[in-house]
Image (cartoon, helix red, strand yellow):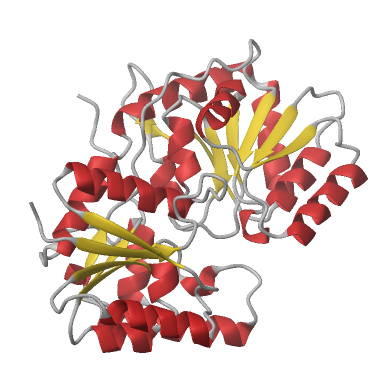
């Protein structure tokens, strides 16, 4: 049995009604670390992270002061990276590891000065911590290149997947489109709607959008875009889905569409690929890593199990979706590639093992700073 780990994460991290990639990562990591023999004590901390009130900061400092000297603290970066002074004060007594899901300044819609302040706060907090965990090589490269962290202190632990039955889809294989992402500006739903609205009207398709709606005004804006484009009979905004409801949505789908402006990884991408669904996604951040490559049976050149498209370019998305819906051969090929990609998807055990190295004070497993590494040739 290892020494206990105190995991500080935003309140609601384990609330199924508040699904997000970061929350899912934290919950799965705790479960897997537990199976490896670690005692992980979750402490949800209330606050307006990463920009907490004075009361939030006081309560967090008080909490850290109650921990025995020499304790190990695993931080969700949404909390730690906004309070570098608190991380610095705790560094005298505690061992601290910070998980960075998304660099704070990369959130869409921030005032430029706020973004600069958050960027500096994150840099300071990570330098005061003993180690950082990045959820993709792309994020790790930001932490070393932009924030100046030593590579051996940055552990790369991509999100894992649970393999699932292959999604049956529809007989035509192209009509059911699925988006799984929080309804926020950064996730790029407006680009997707513009692309679909530009398609020929005789193409049959349906889009389901599943995801939390933290910004009611933005959700209302999307509804107005749908109505204005005359797509109310084709587009459904479902709200957050989890468990059997989310499984049913994936089973209904023929393809996953993921169009964010920025994204450090994109857990929905690997969850779709785990079900044999092709993925069309924005070519940003860690998404190319998540999409990965596969080999078509009998061939030796690796290919994408989907398409990478320019973020925010609705014309490019529309062209690609038109090709998807009109070319049966393309759909069949991408479907086969997606099923092959299942075999090389990351696991939660591998993520937990790398985080365990960080918790134990070991240097990181060597990782490549290139945004992608070509896969090994098929044997």
Residue 289 rendering spot, x and y as whole percentages: 39, 48
Q: Quadrant of the C terminus?
A: top left
Where 245 falls versus 217 (above or below)?
A: above
Instruction: Single out the residue that lies furthest toward the top.
Output: 171
Residue 58 lies, in percent from the top left, at 43, 85
Question: Is the residue 361 above or below the residue 345 in the image?
Answer: below
Instruction: Residue at 26%, 84% (x, y): give it.
Output: 90
Q: Image height check: is 237 above or below 220?
A: above
Task: State the residue at coordinates (15%, 44%).
Answer: 36
Q: Quadrant of residue 264?
A: bottom left
User: Relative to residue 66, is residue 25 drawn left or right?
Assistant: right
Question: Which sits in the foreground, 230 or 360?
Answer: 360
Tell which of 240 and 315 is nearer to you. 240
Q: Is residue 74 visible?
A: yes
Residue drawn 62% across the image and 83% down it:
112
In the image, what residue occupies the spot 29% across and 42% down?
Answer: 348
- Specify whether 373 is left or right of 112: left
Left or right, residue 326 beside residue 229: left
Q: Position of residue 42 (x, y in %)?
A: 32, 58
Q: Residue 324's x, y, as percent?
A: 65, 28
């Amino acid at each position: 049995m290892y020494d206990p780990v105190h995991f500080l994460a935003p309140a609601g991290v384990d609330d199924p009604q508040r699904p997000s990639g970061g929350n899912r990562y934290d919950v799965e990591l705790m479960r897997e670390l537990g199976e490896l023999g670690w005692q992980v004590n979750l402490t949800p901390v209330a606050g307006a992270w990463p920009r907490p009130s004075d009361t939030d900061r006081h309560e967090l400092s008080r909490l850290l002061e109650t921990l025995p000297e020499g304790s190990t603290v695993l931080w969700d970066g949404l909390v730690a990276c906004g309070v570098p002074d608190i991380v610095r004060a705790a560094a005298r007594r505690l061992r601290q590891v910070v998980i960075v899901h998304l660099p704070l300044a990369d959130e869409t819609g921030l005032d430029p000065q706020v973004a600069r302040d958050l960027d500096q706060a994150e840099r300071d907090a990570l330098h005061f911590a003993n180690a950082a965990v990045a959820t993709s090589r792309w994020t790790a490269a930001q932490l070393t290149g932009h924030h100046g962290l030593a590579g051996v202190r940055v552990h790369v632990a991509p999100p894992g997947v649970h393999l699932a039955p292959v999604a049956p889809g529809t007989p035509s294989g192209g009509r059911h489109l699925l988006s799984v992402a929080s309804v926020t500006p950064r996730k790029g739903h407006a680009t997707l709607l513009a692309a679909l609205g530009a398609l020929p009207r005789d193409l049959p398709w349906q889009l389901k959008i599943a995801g939390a709606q933290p910004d009611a005004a933005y959700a209302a804006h999307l509804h107005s875009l749908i109505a204005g484009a005359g797509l109310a009979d084709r587009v459904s905004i479902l709200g957050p889905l989890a468990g059997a409801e989310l499984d049913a949505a994936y089973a209904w789908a023929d393809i996953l569409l993921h169009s964010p402006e920025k994204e450090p990884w994109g857990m929905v991408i690997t969850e779709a690929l785990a079900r044999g669904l092709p993925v069309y996604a924005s070519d940003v951040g860690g998404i190319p890593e998540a999409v990965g490559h596969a080999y078509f049976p009998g061939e030796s050149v690796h290919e994408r199990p989907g398409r990478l498209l320019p973020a925010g370019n609705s014309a490019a998305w529309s062209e690609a979706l038109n090709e998807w819906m009109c070319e049966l051969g393309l759909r069949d090929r991408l479907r086969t590639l997606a099923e092959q990609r299942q075999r090389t998807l990351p696991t939660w055990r591998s993520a937990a093992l790398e985080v365990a190295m960080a918790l134990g004070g070991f240097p990181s497993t060597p990782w490549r700073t290139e945004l992608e590494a070509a896969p090994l040739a098929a044997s």
